[in-house]
């Protein structure tokens, strides 16, 4: 009988809190250009493990705002980096965690995102124009969190996402793009946020998604690929949004994630015995959250934020 694995929560907390401080580590340098996303991954993990209070909120908020470009309304991935929707969402999500959306000029940020919608309803990531369904999700998620979805053409945005649906029920980065679990999360999440999930064939897509489970219990991103912890989020959140999560073996998946932990130094890797990183630590804990693992806060599958944070944004009295 394999020994009973459990979540080394205290070690993961220590790993994240010290990683936040280490600016010159290899990982920090590699992730330099997407440090705002790294903050979102690390801080959301701390919140899921009931430890967000372990960091100084105003210090984080000040750092996030130092990545803001007041003239465009967008955020860069680090101080002095050009604005991009990727990091604008990460910044908004971090401010949501601390309930500090009050520091934003929400109309200005919404105008930045709105300005990136194209004629065909698609979204570009920044002024250089790259189009990808990732940016559709990011834009719709950002505008929704700011209560400003009315600023864009939602119908056209939905129409473009549906044009990226494949015969296998999945979605790609653009029309005709190969189905990939990451892109499927983005398209299903965007459809969920806009109340347009009726465009999804739940049984066909559910089948493609549950087929991602490998013999080792982990989930991969495409057929024939190796299982990887981060797909615990991309695949699982999509299955939950289309109400087909019972089609995979959650116990085996949880064991795979727990088997990817470094239980001495903290952190979770993409697969057993590989190097841990903040990204896979977040997606591993988020995957466990989606499976209601004891001691981990529940997560909203579409907004990729703790449920308590989403409820505070959408159910609060003052709007
Ligand atoms: C840029 N990036 C990736 O390309 C990772 C690389 C990887 C990790 N494990 C396997 N490959 N891949 C990735 O994020 O794929 C998921 C995905 C692809 C396309 C669309 C949506 C999700 C990672 C960073 C990374 C690089 C290298 C090693 C680990 C992490 C990354 O920042 N991914 C972004 C992808 C993304 C961006 C925006 C979204 O709305 C959704 C997803 C992310 O998760 N942001 O929160
Ligand atoms: Zn991965």
Image (cartoon, rainbow, N blue to C red):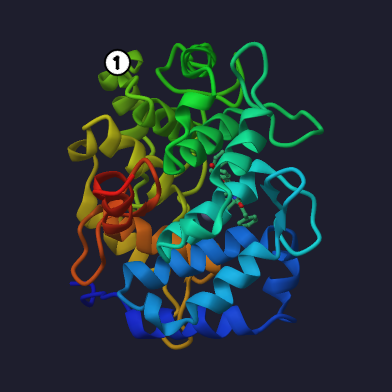
Relative height, residue 52 to residue 282 (above, below): below
Q: Please tell me whether mark 1 sits on a helix, a strand or a loop.
A: helix
Residue 15 x %, y %: 50, 82
Residue 169 x %, y %: 40, 18
In the rendered structure, the answer to whether residue 50 lies left or right of residue 20 reads left
Relative to the observer, which residue lies in front, 216 or 70? Answer: 70
Residue ID at (46%, 25%): 150
Relative to the observer, which residue lies in front, 108 or 284? Answer: 108
Query: What residue is disc 1 on?
Result: 198
Badge 1 residue CB within 8 Å of ligand 1? no
Relative height, residue 221 to residue 27 (above, below): above
Q: Report crowding for label 1: few under 14, some 14 to 19, many 20 or more residues within 10 A (C-alpha).
A: few
Residue ID at (21%, 63%): 293
Residue ID at (48%, 15%): 166
Residue 294 x %, y %: 18, 68
Q: Is residue 43 visible?
A: yes
Residue ID at (58%, 37%): 110
Q: Is residue 223 visible?
A: no
Residue 120 x %, y %: 63, 11
Quarter where residue 298 is shown: bottom left
In the rendered structure, the answer to whether residue 122 lies left or right of residue 101 reads right
In the rendered structure, the answer to whether residue 221 lies left or right of residue 112 reads left
Quarter where residue 48 is shown: bottom left
Where does the C terminus fall, quadrant-wise?
top left
Relative to the observer, which residue lies in front, 243 or 246? Answer: 243
Relative height, residue 17 to residue 295 (above, below): below
Where does the N terminus fall, quadrant-wise?
bottom left
Q: How many marks?
A: 1
Q: Residue furthest front?
A: 318
Relative height, residue 118 to residue 230 (above, below): above
């Amino acid at each position: 009988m394999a020994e009973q694995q459990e979540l080394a929560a205290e070690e993961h907390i220590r790993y994240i809190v010290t990683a936040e401080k280490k600016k010159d580590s290899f990982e920090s340098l590699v992730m330099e250009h997407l440090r705002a996303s790294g903050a979102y991954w690390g801080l959301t993990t701390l919140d899921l493990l009931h430890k967000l209070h372990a960091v100084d909120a105003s210090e984080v908020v000040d750092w996030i705002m130092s990545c803001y470009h007041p003239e465009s309304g967008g955020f860069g991935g680090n101080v002095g980096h050009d604005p991009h929707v990727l990091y604008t969402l990460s910044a908004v999500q971090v401010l949501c965690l601390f309930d500090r959306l009050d520091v934003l000029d929400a109309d200005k940020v919404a105008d930045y995102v709105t300005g990136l919608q194209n004629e065909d309803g698609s979204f570009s990531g920044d002024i250089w124009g790259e189009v990808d369904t990732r940016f559709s999700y990011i834009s719709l998620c950002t505008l929704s969190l700011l209560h400003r979805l009315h600023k864009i053409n939602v119908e056209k945005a939905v129409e473009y996402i549906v044009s990226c649906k494949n015969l296998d029920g999945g979605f790609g980065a653009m029309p005709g793009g190969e189905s990939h679990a990451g892109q499927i999360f983005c398209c299903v999440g965007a459809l969920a946020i806009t109340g347009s999930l009726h465009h999804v064939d739940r049984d066909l897509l559910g089948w493609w998604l549950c087929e991602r489970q490998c013999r080792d219990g982990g989930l991969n991103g495409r057929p024939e690929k190796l299982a990887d912890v981060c797909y615990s989020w991309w695949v699982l959140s999509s299955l939950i949004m289309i109400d087909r999560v019972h089609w995979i073996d959650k116990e085996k998946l949880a064991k795979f994630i727990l088997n990817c932990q470094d239980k001495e130094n903290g952190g979770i890797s993409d697969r057993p015995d590989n190097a841990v990183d903040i990204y896979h630590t977040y997606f591993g804990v988020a995957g466990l959250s989606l499976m209601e693992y004891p001691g981990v806060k529940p997560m909203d599958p579409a907004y990729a934020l703790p449920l308590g944070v989403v409820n505070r944004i959408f159910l609060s009295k003052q709007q």
